[in-house]
Amino acid sequence: MPNPPIPLILDVDTGVDDAFALMLAARHPDLELRAVTCVAGNAAVDQVVANTLYVLDTAGAREVPVARGAARPLLAPPHDAGHVHGPDGLGGFARPSDRRASSLSAVALLRQELLRAIGAGEKVTLVPLAPQTNIALLLRTYPEVAGGIERIVFMGGSASGGNATAAAEFNVWHDPEAAAIVLAACAELSIPVTMYGLDVFQRVTVDGDDAARLRELPDPAAQLAAALIDQQRALFGLETCRIGDAGAVCAVLDAEGLGVETFPVRVEVAPGLARGQTIVDRRTWTGDHRAQAKHVQGQGMSSYSATPAAPAATVDVALEVDAARYAALWLSAFGV
Ligand code: RIB
Ligand code: CA
């Protein structure tokens, strides 16, 4: 008896690589894409909604509901990534969809789908590929949805330096408070977490030959993917293009292709050069941890700020990836 497809929900800021992730999530037979929620990040949230609808149209996934979420981070001002994804967020290839977004907000759609899963005795894998503003609002507003979450596999953070800044990865940097709240909520609600960060995100690539093969297919999603690959290659002056967020969907499909280690993880929210950094605590001696806890609590402060000491989340941090295996898995969404 084959295993039933894995139910998942993506939270996106589409985004070139969010588009790659949507194509795989919508098409792979071992996945069941239940919903997609949108948040401001790479582009403004209304552009993200339009891009997401369009990409799902090209992938033949017009039945998947799409909902609009937070238009800005919880506290910080928004900073788009138009310099990477283009002013339209889709490399200049954005097109309108004749579909409309759900009348529900992102948090309401997430709540609906997760409570529905609980009612059906199922658990859904939640895949945030963007700033975690929607996810923070969801878990703080409706903690009871935790019973419908199998695991959160998020693209974000890094154990080894940033991209938005020298220290911080873009999704966490864009809304550090949201990322800190999500990690704290996952610790409190016992939601397993995998961090698909820059340490692996930057290694999984496809190239110009792959784009040429995709371009030959009579498949609008393959045509769009090829155009986006070549736009990114030209932008960075490289022969290769990262599949980016799509790697996190690969991690849901094929956990064996990822090497993870479990560490306490915190988010720096204080102003300064390290704001938005994911502090992956790789110290092995518990004596150091005990000493820090005594020091921090002795000051009545948490590692986040002057609030009651919030426990670090225990996170499965991805440090190794079989890049060729994940690139091939992504390309399989187009039958190549
Ligand atoms: O740092 C990379 C992340 O930021 C990706 O999710 C990309 O789409 C942008 O959102
Ligand atoms: Ca993204």
Image (cartoon, rainbow, N blue to C red):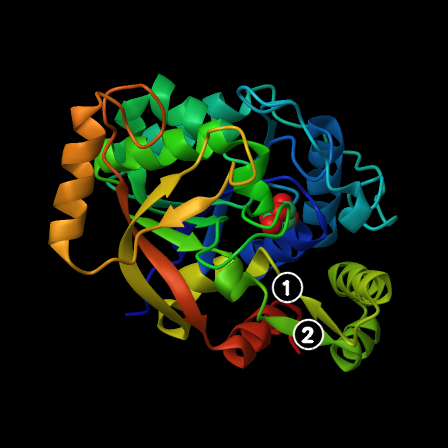
Q: Residue at x 21, y 20 (%)?
A: 300
Residue at the (50%, 34%) spot, across then down: 132
Q: Quadrant of the N terminus?
A: bottom left
Question: Ligand 1 within 8 A of label 2's CB?
Answer: no
Q: Is residue 58 above or below residue 226?
A: above
Q: Position of residue 59 (x, y in %)?
A: 68, 54
**Secondary structure found at label 2:** strand
Question: Which disc is residue 332 wearing?
Answer: none
Residue 234 seen anywhere in this rendered image of the structure? yes
Residue drawn at 77 percent across, 73 percent down: 214
Say which quarter of the image contains residue 79: top right
Task: Indicate the quadrant where residue 223 lies.
Answer: bottom right
Near mark 1 (Cα within 10 A), the count class, few <14, some 14-19 or many ≥20, is many
Residue 118 in view? no
Q: Position of residue 308 (x, y in %)?
A: 23, 20
- Name the residue carrying label 1: 243
Label placed on residue 206: 2
Left or right: where 232 falls relative to 173: right
